[in-house]
Image (spheres, helix red, strand yellow):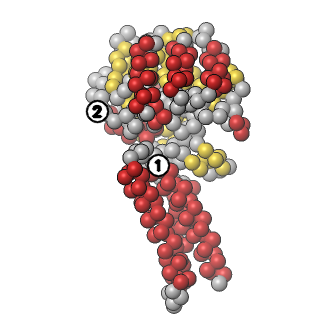
């Protein structure tokens, strides 16, 4: 009986980890078609059933092999637990890169975090200061006021480039004021935007495109933009929510990739991007000491939550962005100033 209880406990924990980890990974595919959702649900339930079936058989159909069956469920659960604690990176590595130069609260819950990046292959951008804004989720008048106030605090600064990495908000009526506030920021070489999953609704998608044109914001919808004055190319990917052809690989380096989802790092690495900037994860949810965040909306695992990562020769920075409820529960939303020196 003690062995059965131990097996049941370990299997239950493994089942929970499998359900959470695989469920989030499958959700990261971000297809909202009913058939795709049913397929993902079937995969998730089948994997969970595979894990727990040997234990159930040993209980419902007692035999001399009961302990063996219980051991199979326990062994599979231990593998799931190990993978959950130390997820495979699919060759993506978390790397210590750059340093925090300063951190200043703009409004309650939103900070301006100034980071440095060693210029390395970005030597042409030596001295550049770029602003990164992501995951605004401006869904109420109060949130719009908070974001506007935060942006007003940095409106007197001039950046070389401003990058907006998607998820502006789910309320179409607030998009004009949201884009207007972002467009009021000053940049030397322009403001560039890629849309995210919460910008994929057809009406919001078209509204953002129209407002970008109105406010002279460059929308990089699966296309590239060359800055001849600094010999730099920007490539925006809006996959998987905005399907389209992948732009041709820029002929000159360095070049920077912009994306909402950090999952696109594999595409950018194959193309040979020098630097990739991403958002979407909100820094992960349900932070647990040692383990880190439990829920990260990525097909590549929960470790891809925020910070610096490397795949082959491509370096990627993932910002947690402003988020839904900046400041709630002590979690700060961030706007990032990236200084290349």
**Residue 176, image x, y percentages:** 51, 18
| Spatial CA span between label 2 and label 1 | 23 Å
- Residue appearing at x 52%, y 54% in the figure: 21
Relative vertical location of residue 60 with respect to residue 277 in this rendering, above or below: below
**Residue 79, image x, y percentages:** 51, 65
**Residue 37, image x, y percentages:** 42, 52
**The image quarter in which residue 4 lies:** bottom right
Q: Residues within 10 Å of mark 1 (few under 14, many from 20)?
A: some
Q: State the SS at label 2.
A: loop
The mark that comes first in sequence, 2 or 1, is: 1
Relative vertical location of residue 152 with respect to residue 172 in this rendering, above or below: above
Note whether residue 263 is visible: yes
Q: Nearer the viewer, residue 151 or 156?
A: 151
**The image quarter in which residue 261 lies:** top left
**Image quadrant occupied by the N terminus:** bottom right
The reply, left or right, for residue 323 in relation to residue 31 is: right
- Residue appearing at x 49%, y 54% in the figure: 23
Q: State the SS at label 1.
A: helix
Name the residue tied to disc 1.
Answer: 27
- Residue appearing at x 34%, y 23% in the figure: 224
Q: Residues within 10 Å of mark 2 (few under 14, many from 20)?
A: few
Name the residue tied to disc 2.
Answer: 245
């Amino acid at each position: 009986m003690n062995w059965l209880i131990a097996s049941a406990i370990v299997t239950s924990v493994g089942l929970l980890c499998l359900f959470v980890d695989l469920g989030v990974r499958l959700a990261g595919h971000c297809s909202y078609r009913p058939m795709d959702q049913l397929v993902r649900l079937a995969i998730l339930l089948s994997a969970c059933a595979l894990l727990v079936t040997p234990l159930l058989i040993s209980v419902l159909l007692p035999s001399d092999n009961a302990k063996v069956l219980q051991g199979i469920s326990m062994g599979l659960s231990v593998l799931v637990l190990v993978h959950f604690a130390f997820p495979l990176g699919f060759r993506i590595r978390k790397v210590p890169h750059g340093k925090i130069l300063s951190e200043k609260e703009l409004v309650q819950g939103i900070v301006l975090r100034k980071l440095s990046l060693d210029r390395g292959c970005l030597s042409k951008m030596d001295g550049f200061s770029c602003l990164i804004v992501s995951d605004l989720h401006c869904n109420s008048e109060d949130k719009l006021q908070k974001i506007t106030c935060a942006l007003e605090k940095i409106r007197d600064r001039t950046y070389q480039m401003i990058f907006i990495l998607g998820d502006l908000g789910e309320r179409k009526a607030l998009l004009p004021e949201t884009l207007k506030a972002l467009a009021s920021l000053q940049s030397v070489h322009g403001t560039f935007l890629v849309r995210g999953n919460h910008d994929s609704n057809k009406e919001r998608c078209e509204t953002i495109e129209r407002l970008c044109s109105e406010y002279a914001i460059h929308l990089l919808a699966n296309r590239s933009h060359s800055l001849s004055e600094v010999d730099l190319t920007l490539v925006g990917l809006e996959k998987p929510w905005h399907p389209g052809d992948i732009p041709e690989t820029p002929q000159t380096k360095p070049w920077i990739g912009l994306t909402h989802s950090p999952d696109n790092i594999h595409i950018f690495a194959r193309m040979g991007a020098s630097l990739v900037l991403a958002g979407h994860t909100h820094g992960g949810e349900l932070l647990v000491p040692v383990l880190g965040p439990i829920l990260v909306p990525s097909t590549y695992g929960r470790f891809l939550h925020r910070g610096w990562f490397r795949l082959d020769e491509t370096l990627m920075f993932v910002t947690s962005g402003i988020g839904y409820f900046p400041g709630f529960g002590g979690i700060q939303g961030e706007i990032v100033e990236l200084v290349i020196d």
